Image (tube, helix red, strand yellow):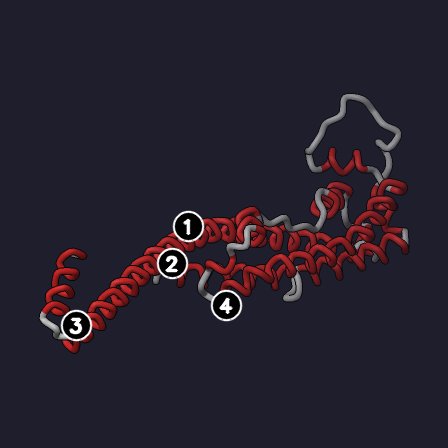
Amino acid sequence: MIKFFRKIRQKLLTENKFSKYLLYAIGEIILVVIGILIALQINNNNNYNEQRSLEQEYLISLQSEFETNLNQINASIQENELRIQSLEYLLTLFDKNVLDTVNSQIISQKFAPIFGSEISYVPATGVLNDIISSGKLNMILNKSLRQNLASFNSSLDFLNKQINGAEFTDEKLRTILYEKGSIRKIVTDIGFMNFEHESISEKLDNKLVFESIEFENYLLGYRLLADATNGPRLFGRIKKEIETILKEIEQELEK
């Protein structure tokens, strides 16, 4: 092809047709430029397709991770709701008239959701952190989705700070129960453990803790904290953010 164009140029020069040669030369330059532009466009398209393919892989992985996180936050909300119900019930037992009508086993059953676990939420963030740390977040074209993903860890940090504030109250409740009550009786009443030998706490009644004003204060404080945790600023906020991210991911995958 190059030899062909060279022959045409030589022929025009030998025939002294300079104007036609000039037009031809300009046309040849234009063809070369067009060829370069086409090659660049093809290369850009290939790069774009590769990026979109990688974006799809990231979106699928993120979708799986955030579906797991949604299940986990729903479980945490449900667990905390049981904790709130138990706390509400136990607070009624500071009325002696109510306390006298309740047996030890019921009290143990209400203690279990409170002292069996702490208020917590542990999400999966491996995929998200990997994308952010590798600087690949910009490969996600949807600006709103990109911003929501970038801010999710900040929301988790805020949540953890608030939950950490509940640890003090939780610890104080446990300390009072350890001093005035019987953990052994609780685990026995709920059928969690059976003991072969007798204990000095065998005859101890956990109703005694309801004579403590300090225990009532911390129990009420814990009730308020648990309720706030399930509210729109904490667990409710995280759940809403996860649902928004999942919706945006789904919309992107459907394009």
* Foreground tag (2 vs 1): 1
Q: Which label's residue is closer to the chain start, 4 or 3?
A: 3
Residue sitting at x 68%, y 50%: 120
Question: Which amino acid is tagged 2?
Answer: Leu
* Residue carrying label 3: 21
Q: Look at the image and tell me whether residue 154 can be seen.
A: yes
Q: Quadrant location of the N terminus?
A: bottom left
Height in image: 164 above or below 9? above
Judged from the image, the secondary structure of the residue bearing numbered disc 1 is helix
Q: Quadrant location of the C terminus?
A: bottom left
Q: Which label's residue is closer to the chain start, 1 or 4?
A: 1
Residue 57's disc number: 1
Judged from the image, the secondary structure of the residue bearing numbered disc 3 is helix
**In the picture, residue 195 is in which quadrant?**
top right
Question: Which amino acid is tagged 3?
Answer: Tyr
What is the crowding at mark 3: few (fewer than 14 residues within 10 Å), some, or many (at least 20)?
A: some
Q: CA distance from mark 4 to mark 2?
A: 15 Å
* Residue carrying label 2: 253
**In the picture, residue 229 is in which quadrant?**
bottom right
User: 18 or 197: which is nearer to us?
Assistant: 18
* Residue carrying label 4: 144
Question: Which amino acid is tagged 1?
Answer: Glu
Height in image: 38 above or below 172? below
**In the picture, residue 97 is in which quadrant?**
bottom right
Q: Are marks 4 and 2 in contact (CB under 8 Å)?
A: no
Q: Which label's residue is closer to the chain start, 4 or 2?
A: 4
Q: x, y percentage for residue 20?
A: 14, 75
Q: Are marks 2 and 3 in contact (CB under 8 Å)?
A: no
